Image (cartoon, rainbow, N blue to C red):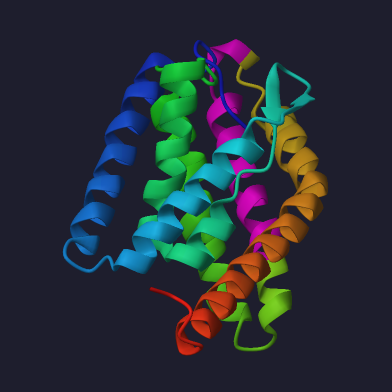
Amino acid sequence: MHTPDGFLHPWMAVAFIIASGGVLAYAARKLRGTVTPRQTQLFGMVTASIFAAQMLNWPLPGGVSAHFVGGALAAIVLGPYLGALSVALVVAVQALVFADGGVLALGANVWNMAIVQVFGGYAVYRVASAYHESGAIVLAGWASITLAALAAGIQLGLSPAFGSELISVVTVMAGGHAVLGVGEALLTLVGVRLVDRLDAVDSETVEGGVAA
């Protein structure tokens, strides 16, 4: 759901750069001295997987696109603070290296995908996991991308590029991603279960004395 350069009002682009930078700085400060070697390993694996998955895009009306974002996956596996930094890194590399989304819209894209989706997905997961673990993962994956699309739709709907057609743009963005969110939800479940399986295999290897 990258928002391209030129689609946001300049003041909005600047505001989201500041807001996103502030939240990420807070997340980094919360993590200081607490990240374990295993979390560092998972950070690299999750970030690389999300980066690869985000390279596959589906176009939506109005010049924007949809793709697997992985915010809920990052939040559930890494926790919300490390998860936000993971997705933010992916979004930044795509903007600065591949010009996907652009530099001026980087703050807004980080806000939508690394903050709204990660923290929103994590909140849904925490509430729903008390009732059903797998269902909570699926719901978090779907809700997270729908919330991020809603945020992007509001940003775009208020911009001159879309003639300030707020309701129309929000309907297209949120509606389209609510449907595509089924795929995000299922991929989130698969991703979390794969990480669980890898953790189980690592534990069995160490307990069996195979690891050096």
Which residue occupies the foreground of this view, 73 or 144? 73
Compared with 7, 85 (above or below) is: below
Does residue 150 show up magenta in the picture? Answer: yes
Using the rendered image of the protein, determine whether residue 102 is visible from the camera's viewpoint: no
Percent from the top left, x then y, of residue 13?
39, 23
Query: Horizontal and vertical percent for residue 61?
Result: 78, 21
Q: Which residues are magenta?
A: 139-161
Q: Position of residue 106 (x, y in %)?
A: 42, 26
Residue 30 in which image quadrant: bottom left
Question: Residue at the location (52% across, 80% down)?
Answer: 205
Q: Quadrant of the C terminus?
A: bottom left
Name the one closer to the observer, 203 or 75.
203
Magenta includes 143?
A: yes
Q: Is residue 143 left or right of residue 7?
A: right
Q: Main secondary structure of the magenta part?
A: helix
Quarter of the N terminus within the rendering = top right
- Horizontal placement of 97 versus 182: left or right? left
The residue drawn where x is 45% and y is 60% is 42
Residue drawn at 46 percent across, 44 percent down: 87
Taking the spot 31% from the left edge, 39% from the top edge, the residue there is 19
Instruction: Judge left or right: residue 28 versus residue 143.
Output: left
Question: For residue 161, what is the image quadrant?
Answer: top right
Question: Residue 91's x, y, as percent?
Answer: 47, 33
The residue nearer to you, when weighing 131 against 157, is 131
Vertical position of residue 162 compared to residue 188: above or below = above
Q: Nearer the viewer, residue 170 or 84?
A: 84
Q: Is residue 210 visible?
A: yes
